[in-house]
Amino acid sequence: MHGVRRDKQSKEAIEARKQKEQSKIREYLALTDHVLTRKKNKDYTREALETTTQLLQLNPEFYTIWNYRRLILLNGIFPKSSPTEINDQLSDDLSMTTVALRAHPKVYWIWNHRRWCLENVPTGPGSEGDPDYLGWRQDYWKKEMFVVEKMLDVDARNFLAWSYRRYVLASMPVPRNPKTELAYTKRKIEANFSNFSAWHQRSKILASLWAKGELDEYQSKESEFELIKNAMFTVPEDQSAWIYHRWLVGAGRDKGILEREIDVIKMLLDEQPDSKWCMESMVHYNLLLIKNHSSNVDVPKLTQECRSFLKELRIVDTARTRRYDEIEEELGA
Amino acid sequence: MDEGTFDVIVIGTGLSESISAAALSKAGFKVAHLDKNPYYGAEEASLFLDEFVQWTKDSPDGCFAFSRSGNESLPQSRQYSISLSPSVIASTGPLISSLISSGVSRYGGFRLLDQFGIYDSSGTVSRVPGNKEDIFKNKNISLVDKRRLMRFLTFAAGDFEEAKELKDNERAPFVDFLRRTFSLNDDIVSTITYALSHCLSASDTTLPALQRLRRYLRSAGRYGSSPFLFGHYGSSGEIAQGFCRTSAVAGGVYILGKPISSITSTPQLDDDPNHRNYTIHLDDFPDPLTCDIIISSEKHVPNDLVEHVKRVSTKSGTEAVVSSYPSVARCVAIIDRPISFLPSQNSQEGDSLEEDVDAAEEDDDYSPEAEPSASKAKPTQAPVDAGILVFPPSSLSGGSATTFSVTAFIVGDSTMSTPKDKWIIYISTPVAQDNTFSPEEILRPYLDAVLALALPIDPSDSAPTPLTPLFTTFYLQACPTSPSVPPSTSSTSVGQSSHIISSDSTTSTTRTYLIPPSLPLLPLPESPDAAALGAESVFWEAVNVLKRLRGLRQAKSELGVDKTDREETQAQEQREGEIQIESFWPPLNQNDDEEL
C-alpha cells in the first residue's frame, strides 16, 4: 500500500510467523489426507460434502476435490433430494464459486464447476407444460450474464471470462440479439482497445452475422476498417489491432481493398518509420497481392519492396530473423 | 514546560501552514496553531454561502474590487462549500502522498474530475483527449494527427530531460516547440498547451510546461482515467482542516478567532533554559504564548522582526513557473440548472465511430439488473458535476483575455460542495500589469459563454430559457509575491511585503521565523502540490533549527544547574536525544484510526 510503512520485522516476529505457517501446512495436509481417504472409500455423505467445502476454500485449484464434490452430489445427495432441494444445493454451490472467483478469477476448475451446476439444474418449479417449467434454469442464465459482466468489468482481458461468456450466450434458453453483443464488444474496445479477447469476440459475432445474412458483409467490413485504422494509428505497437486487420483483409481476394489498406499502412509507416508491425504487414499484404492478383500488379516491383522491408525487419526485429529469411525464400519461389 | 510554551507557533491555517503544523506535531514537537478567523483554511478556506457573501464584504486581505449580484441569502447556505482558492489535486504528487502518509485522506472523500472541455473559436466545446482511448474515439482528429499526438504524449510522459527533441528548446515558447518539433496542428497545440499542460499564455516556456504535463499524465489512471481529484466540501479548506485535525490529535493546540495583538522577540538571557525566542499576545486571551519558531506567511511579519525571517524555498523540481502577472480575476457563480460540455460518454453516441450497428441495437427480454452495462437510453448530454472548461487566449469573441487563458471549473452535489441541483461555477484568469478593466468586465463574457451551455429544462425544447445565476460575485485577488500588493488592512499585519529584506544568509544567527513559499493561484492543479512541497521544506528547516536550539540549551544546562531545574533539564536532555526524525510523516499506526 502506498504511504504505509512496513514495520521492521523482529527476529521473533519472523520466527512466530514461520511457526504459524508450519501449523497451517500441517492442518492442510491432514485435511487433504482425510478427504482423499473418504473419497477412496466412496463416502458420499453430507459430512463428506462439508469436508470438501472446507478444503476447496483453502485451495480452489485442487481439481480432484471438485470432482469428488460432484460425485458426492450426484451419487449421495441428489438421489435423496427433491427437485427444490437440488436447486437449493446448486444455488449454494454457485455462490461458493462466485466467492472463489472473486479471489481466483483465472482458475479453470471453478469455472468448470459453475458450468456443471448450471447444466444440472432440474426442470422446475413447474411441471411439464407449465409456463415456469424452465423457470429455475432461465433465472440462472439471466444471472450468469450478470456475473460474467462483473468479471469482465474487473478485468476486461480475462480470456476465461470471455470464453465463459460465449458459453452462456450459447446456452441461454432465449438467445440474446447478437447485435447487442456486438455493441458490448464495442464498449469494451472503447474502454481499452488493447483487448485481444474483445476484438476476437467481435470477429466471431460479425462472421456469424455475415453468414446468416443479417448484416451486409461489405458495408460492415468498411466500418470495421475505419474502426481498426484508428487503433493502428493511435498505438501502432498494439498487436491486437494488426491481427484484427489481418482477419478483415482475409485471403486478399479483393484487390481494391488490399491496395487501399496497403496505402493506409504506408501512410502510417511514413509517420512512424520504425514500426515493425507496419513493415511486417506490408510484406504480408504485398505477398497476398502477388499471390492472388499477379496478372494485375507489378510483381517485380512489389517483390523488391518486400525484400527491402524484410531487410529492415531483420534489423528492427532481430529475434525473428529466421522467420524473415523464410518469408524471403518464399518470395523467390 | 508550562502550558503557554511551545516549540513552534504557526500563524494562519492555510494549506501549507496546516501541513507543516501536522507534520511537526506528529514528529513530537509542541505546536500552537493560530488563526484570527473563526474558520480553518485562511486564504484556502471553504466557506458556507452566507460566510462567503460576508467575506466578500469584509475587505479580505489581498482581495479587492468586489461586485455582487443576485440573491445574497439563498436557502441551504450550509450545504455550500465555496472555496476561496479553487484547485484540484493531481492523483500522483506531493499533496496526495502527504494526505495518504498522514492519514488525513481517511477523514473525507474525493471526487475524480470527469469532464474536460476546451472552447474553440467557433463557439463549440470539444472534449479534451487525455489518454489513448480518448484519442482512439475522437472523430475530430485525423489519423496522422492521432499518431503525432500519441507520439508527443508518449514523449511527454517519459524522461525527456536528455532527449534530443528538447535540446536548446527548454526556454522556447511551448506552442512553437509543439508545432516545430512534433508537427502538430494549431488545434492540437492549443489543446495540449492550455487544456493538458494548463499553460496560462502563449509565452509559457517549454521545459516547465512539459514537466507539468508529465506530472498530470502520470497521474492519469491511478484512481480513474482522469488525473485530478477534488476533495469533498470544497477541497482546499476541508483538506487544510483535515491536517489541523491530525495536528490536534497529535497534541497541537488550536486557537481560532483571536487576532494577534503583538509578536515580540525576547532577547536571549544567557543562562535561562526557559528562554523562548518569541512571545505572542492574542486579543481577549489571558496568557501570552511563547515559542522558538514562528511559521507564517509574509503578511503577518511585524516590521521589527524582519531580520529573523527566512524565506524557505522548495528544494529543486517543481517551481510553479507561470507567466508573471500581478493578480487574478475571479468569478464565483451559483446556478440551479446543469450545464453540459459534451454529449454523453455512452458509446451509442455519435461521438464514437460506428453508428449503424448501435442504432440497430434492440431491446432484450432481460431485465435491467441482468444487463447493467447495456444502456438503452437515447443519447443524452451528461451534466457536468466536476469538470474543467478551458478558454485558450482569444478563443472567445468579445472576451478580453487575449494574453491569458481563462479557466472555468464547475462542481455539483456529487462533490458535496452544493445542495442537490445546484452547481458552483468558478472562473479565473490572470490579469496583466496594465489592465484597466474591472474583474466583472473581464469575466462576464466567459460566464455568459458557460451559462449558454446550460441544458434545457425540457429536453425537447429547442430554444431553452437562458440560465441566470442565483448569485454571482466578481473580484480581483493579488498574487502573493507581487510587489504591487495593496496594503493589508488587517490590524495584525504591520509589515508590507515589499519591505521585507530577502537576503537571509548575511548573519550566522539561526533564523527562526520561517516563511513558506507562497502558493501559485493558477493553474488549478498547482497550488495543492506547491503547498505540500513548501510545507515539507519548512518542516525540515524547523526540525534543524529546533535540534540546534535543543543542543545549545543542553550545553547551557550542563554548566552548573539549579536543583529546582534539574528535572526539567533531564527532560530536555531526553528530548534532545529523542529528536530522531527520519521522514516527513511517521508511519501510520492503527491507533490513528479514529473512525472506520
Image (spheres, coloured by chain):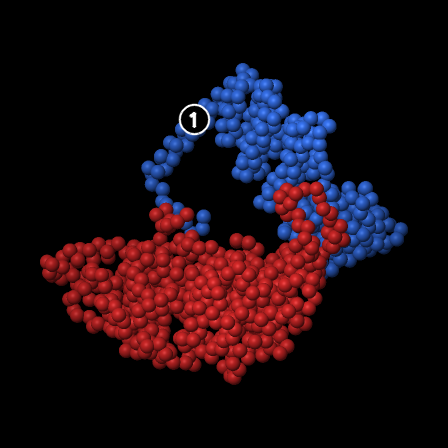
Chain colours: A blue, B red
Figure check: B478 above or below A76: below
Quadrant assignment, res A302: bottom right
Which corner quadrant of the image does residue A82 belong to?
A: top right
Q: Compared to B330, does A315 lie above or below?
A: above
Q: Which of the image's four quarters has the N terminus of chain B? A: bottom left
Quick check: can you spot residue A316? no
Residue at 38% in and 31% down? A19
Report whether B30 appears left or right of B155: left
* Residue B484 image position (x, y, % from top left): 43, 81
State the image coordinates of residue B440 (x, y, percent, origin top left).
Answer: 53, 78
Callout 1 crowding tier (Cα within 10 Å): few <14, some 14–19, many ≥20:
few
**Disc 1 sits on a residue from what chain?**
A
What residue is shown at x 15% (from left), y 55% (from top)? B567
Q: Position of residue B509 (x, y in %)?
A: 26, 71
Q: Amino acid at mark 1?
A: Arg
The residue to which callout 1 is attached is: A26
Q: Please state if A194 lies on the left or on the right of B37 as rendered.
A: right
Relative to A192, does residue B161 appear above or below in the rendering? below
